[in-house]
Image: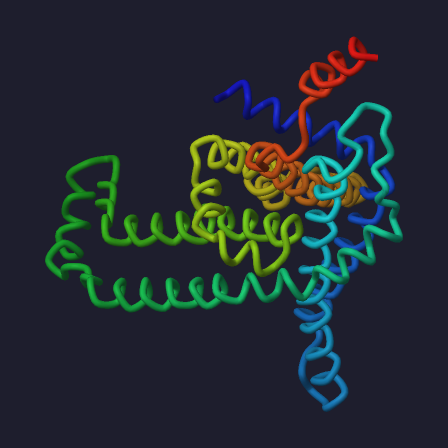
Amino acid sequence: MLTETFHSIATAARKLLKNWQSMVVLAIVYAVLLAALYFFMAIREASIAQVVLTFGLAIAAFVLFFLLQAIIAGGIAGGIAGVSGSEPGAKTGFGIGSLVKRSVANLWKLVVISLPLIVLAILIAYLLGKAQNYFWVEPNAANDMLEPMAGSRSRNPARAPINWRVAIFSSLRYLSFGLLLPLATIHLWLATVRDGLWPATRRIGTHLSRAFAPQSVLIYILGFLVFGLLPYFLLFKATPTSRAWLEISLLVVRLAVVFALTLFGWVITVWALSHSSTPPTHPSPSAKAAAVEPAREAA
C-alpha cells in the first residue's frame, strides 16, 4: 500500500509539473481568491457602499473557491483520470480555454453536490457544541485552592491535569472537519466532474467507501502535512532578526512558500486521490498490445 501511495503522489506531481499552463491558471485564481478573502475581512461595514462591497466579496470568494476546485478536478479529468492523453505522447485535448470553460460549466455541479456536506458540517458543529456544553465540568474550587499550596512545597509547579472531555471533543472536531468531511468532499467532486452530477449522486455509497479506504486516507494525511501543517508552522513561527529589511524579506519568502505549498500541495493531493481511486476505464498498454498482436498475425 505504501508503494502504491507514493506512486500515486509521484504521478500526480509529474502531471502537475508537465502542465505548467494549468499551474499558472491555478495560481492566478488562488491569488484572486486570497485577495477577495483579505478584503472581505479588512473592509469595515461603515457605509452602504462598504456593506455592498463586503457582500459582493463574499459571493466572489464563494464562486472563486468552487471555480478553483472545478479547475483542479477538470485538469484531472483531462489527464490523470484517463479521459484523454492516456498514452505517452498523446495530446490531452484539454487546452487552457477548454479547461476553464469546462470548469465554469462544472462549478454549479460542485456547489450542488457540496450542499449536503455543508449542511452536515453545520449539524456536526452544532451537535458537538451542544454536547460539549452538556458534558462540561466546571473546575473544582478546592483544587484551585490547593494548587498554590502544592506549588509552595515544590520548586516545579504542578502540571494541570488533562481535561479528557475537552481533548475528546477537540479530537472529534479535528477528525470531522480535518479528515472525514474533506475526504468525502474531494471524492464526490472528482466523481461529479468525471461522471456527472446524477451518476455521482446515485453511486454516493461507492464513492464514500473509496474515500475512506486505507490508501486514500494515507494519501490525504501525507498531503495534509504539505498543504496544512507545514504552511502553518512557516506562517506563524516567527524568525527573530535584528534588521528590519531582513525580517521583511523573510516574511515575503515565507508567504511565497506558504502560497506554493498550500496550492500545489492541495492539487497534488487531490490528483493523487483521483489516481488511486479512479477505476480503470481504458485498457492498459499491455492489453492493447495483446489485442493488436492477433490481428497482425491474421493479416
Query: What residue is shown at x 64% (from left), y 42% (from top)?
Result: 266
- Considering only vertical position in the picture, is 275 above or below 262? above
Identify the image quadrant of residue 19: top right
Nearer to us in this view, 179 or 158: 179
Query: What residue is shown at x 49% (from left), y 52% (from top)?
Result: 203
94 vs 161, left or right, is right
> In the displayed image of the protein, which residue is found farthest to the top?
297
Identify the image quadrant of residue 11: top right
- Considering only vertical position in the picture, is 220 above or below 53? above
Whole-percent x and y of residue 105?
75, 62
- Considering only vertical position in the picture, is 272 above or below 68? above
Query: What residue is shown at x 79% (from left), y 12% (from top)?
Result: 298
Whole-percent x and y of residue 106?
71, 59
> In the displayed image of the protein, which residue is found farthest to the front?
298
Nearer to us in this view, 229 or 194: 194
148 vs 188, left or right, is left
Whole-percent x and y of residue 43?
71, 75
> In the displayed image of the protein, which residue is found farthest to the bottom?
48
Whole-percent x and y of residue 136?
22, 62
Label count reads 0
Identify the image quadrant of residue 198: bottom right
